[in-house]
Amino acid sequence: GGQPAGLSFLENVEKECLEEASLPPEVIAQIQPAGVVSYRYTTRKGLSTKSIAVFDLEFPEGMSPICGDGEVEEFNLMTIEHALESIRTKLPLWKPNAALVMVDFALRHGFISSEEPGYEELQTLLRRS
């Protein structure tokens, strides 16, 4: 969700996890801040720059998020490897900012090797402001 005035990034992600994914408080309490991803895109008014606060959360075995407030159409749980393959081969199915966050996660957790072509460029572009 958007970042409302008066809430910290952590308070907002906790609120969104409850509202959009119906996560219980004991799971929400495990959220870990993981940095910021930045991206740019062209609009009719010119270049727009956005930043996304990123958080990591490992779900307990067998847990699935439940659409809570109607803002999320569905959740698709998949392995990291499957998500990366989907981004490589079916990128139009991904919301652009969600794909960026997934790639950031994969980079930070070693699922994309430093030997992979474009590794350094990905690292740089995701943190450009």
Image (cartoon, rainbow, N blue to C red):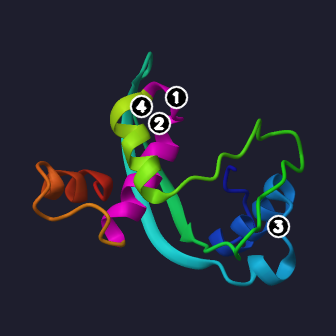
Labels 2 and 3: the sequence-earlier one: 3
Tell me where residue 47 appears, x and y as whole percent. 36, 30
Amino acid type, mark 1: Leu
Tell me where residue 77 appears, x and y as whole percent. 63, 53
Labels 4 and 3: the sequence-earlier one: 3
| Callout count | 4
| Marks 4 and 3 close (CB-CB < 8 Å) | no
Which residue is tagged 2?
Answer: 96
- Which residue is at a point 75% across and 40% down the rendered structure image? 74
Q: Is residue 46 magenta?
A: no
Judged by its main secondary structure, the magenta piece is helix
Q: Judge from the rendering whether residue 16 lies leftward or rightward of residue 90; answer left or right.
A: right
Which residue is tagged 4?
Answer: 91
Of labels 4 and 2, the one closer to you: 4
Distance from disc 4 to disc 2, alpha carbons, whole Å, reads: 8 Å
Q: For the residue carrying disc 4, how many other residues have a C-alpha within 10 Å: few (<14), some (14-19), or many (20+)?
A: few
| The magenta segment | 92-108
Q: For this rendering, which residue is in front, 18 or 43?
A: 18
Distance from disc 3 to disc 1, alpha carbons, whole Å, reads: 25 Å
Above or below for 56 versus 92: below
Q: For the residue carrying disc 1, how many other residues have a C-alpha within 10 Å: few (<14), some (14-19), or many (20+)?
A: few
Q: Residue furthest top?
A: 44
| Marks 2 and 3 close (CB-CB < 8 Å) | no
Q: Using the rendered image of the protein, determine whether residue 24 is visible from the camera's viewpoint.
A: yes
Distance from disc 4 to disc 3, alpha carbons, whole Å, reads: 27 Å
Q: Is residue 94 magenta?
A: yes
| Marks 4 and 1 close (CB-CB < 8 Å) | yes
Tell me where residue 80 appears, x and y as whole percent. 45, 58
Amino acid type, mark 2: Pro
Which residue is tagged 1?
Answer: 93
Q: For the residue carrying disc 3, how many other residues have a C-alpha within 10 Å: few (<14), some (14-19), or many (20+)?
A: many
